[in-house]
Amino acid sequence: MGRLTIVGIGYKPLEPKAKRAIATAGVILGSRRLCEVFAGYPQYAKARERVLRIDSVDETMRHIRKAFEEGTREIVLLGSGDPFFFGIGRRAVQEFGRETVEIIPDLSSLQVAFSRAKEPWDDALVISLHAGPNPDKRRRLKYDLADVPGLLETHDTLGILTDKEHGPSVIAAFLAASAPRSGELLLYVGERMGYRDEKMTSGTVEEIAAMPFVDPNVLIIRRDVGPSRAALKSGLPRFGLREEEIDHSRGLITKDEVRAVSIHALRLPESGVLWDVGSGSGSLSLEAARLSPGLRVFSIEKDEEQLRLLEQNRSAFAIPNITVVAGTAPEALRALPSPDRVFLGGSGGMTESIIGLFSRRMKRGIAVVNAATLETLTEASTALEKAGFQVKVSEVSIARSRPLAGKRLMAALNPIFIITGEKSP
């Protein structure tokens, strides 16, 4: 096999190595947009007869493989900016191997946009909402639009690669409707970065939501961190909220130690859907949502007092990725998106029905049930096994110290069974 050189273009003159690769390549491949960009480079005049436009990534890979098989030794593939920054570089290395592929990067579009906006990006989280132009073949991305408000709760700056489905106006309108304290956000839109008509626009979420923008573009979101938010971020741990920090009533809360073991058993993903069924005041939901800001947490509760406390806690901790669902399981679960994780802390005597419902919706994932009685232990374990879960059971016995006559003694709490079911396709 020959050599595939991916040359990033768009923002600065080509370095000598890139010039040599273009001069010796048997064919130079690029999308329509990148071929238009390349036409502005001095090297284009001598290379134009070898330039082939292919817009499909799959077709591009097939063409490269066929060209190598037919004896072409040097191929250049044009990439946008840095080909390893959500670009073609990863796919090319997967297809042809590290020994065959060489990457010569340019600047990334977001890197240029941060510079134009005069904003630092060393503390930014950079994500892609660019899933591809074909609606039927859109890529599965690590994050989607629904994750953005939650990400802004843990990162004060986001850089987003956009596409026509998720452009700056759409994202801004979504933030205006769903992000807590959206008035603190300043947005920058970089249109056609690297072109002669590139343009930077800044504004509030409401202002950006009302504007049209030209493709391609990128979006920067920056939150103004005031003293109160800075205190909130520095004053509370990501994990380890104490019972006394969470509003609850009558001692109805998952004890700290049990909550820690339950969350460990859930093995929370960075994104996806968690159902917290019988969530009470929401202690597990709070910890899970703070640990995984990209996770969509649905807290299901039927008791009015607990619902009030749940909403109160969600607002107090400013957690946007918790959705409170008022209702009785399993009926209240039917309209929810399919879960990747389920925590069942209270079932109201409907353990088997609840497990039956979510097991039909889960192709793979983890369910954790907390049981205080032997009857619930038996019912939950049996139902999970019948539904195709691999089941493990742990017993958590906790004793806490308390003072007595100037000394300390250990007082035992009721033991809790933690039933973990794991399902694979």
Image: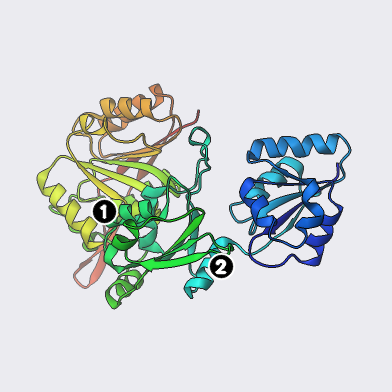
Q: Position of residue 423 (x, y in %)?
A: 46, 31
Q: Which residue is mark 2?
A: 112
Q: Do we see residue 121 in this rendering?
A: no
The way the protein has been coloured in the rendering is rainbow
- Local crowd size for mark 2, using a 10 Å CA cut-off: few (<14), some (14–19), many (≥20): some
Q: Is residue 15 above or below residue 371?
A: below
Quick one: SS at disc 1? helix
- Relative to 410, is 64 on the left or the right? right
Q: Do we see residue 344 in this rendering?
A: yes
Location of the N terminus (image quadrant):
top right
Quick one: SS at disc 2? helix
Q: Is residue 143 above or below residue 41?
A: above
Q: Earlier in the sequence, mark 1 or mark 2?
A: 2
Q: Position of residue 183 (x, y in %)?
A: 27, 66
Q: Which residue is mark 1?
A: 177
Q: Position of residue 189 (x, y in %)?
A: 44, 62
352 or 230: nearer the viewer: 230
- Relative to 411, is 1 on the left or the right? right
Q: Residue at x 34, y 69 (%)?
A: 233
Label pair 1/2, CB-CB below 8 angstroms? no
Separation of marks 1 and 2 at Cα, in angstroms: 29 Å
72 or 42: nearer the viewer: 42
Q: Is residue 241 above or below residue 146?
A: below
- Relative to 329, is 108 on the left or the right? right
Q: Please tell me in which quadrant of the rendered image residue 223 appears.
A: bottom left
235 or 197: nearer the viewer: 197
Give the mark toward the camera: 1 or 2. Answer: 2
Task: Name which residue type carries label 2.
Answer: Val
- Local crowd size for mark 1, using a 10 Å CA cut-off: few (<14), some (14–19), many (≥20): few
Q: Residue at x 74, y 65 (%)?
A: 14
Q: In the displayed image of the protein, which residue is found farthest to the left?
A: 304
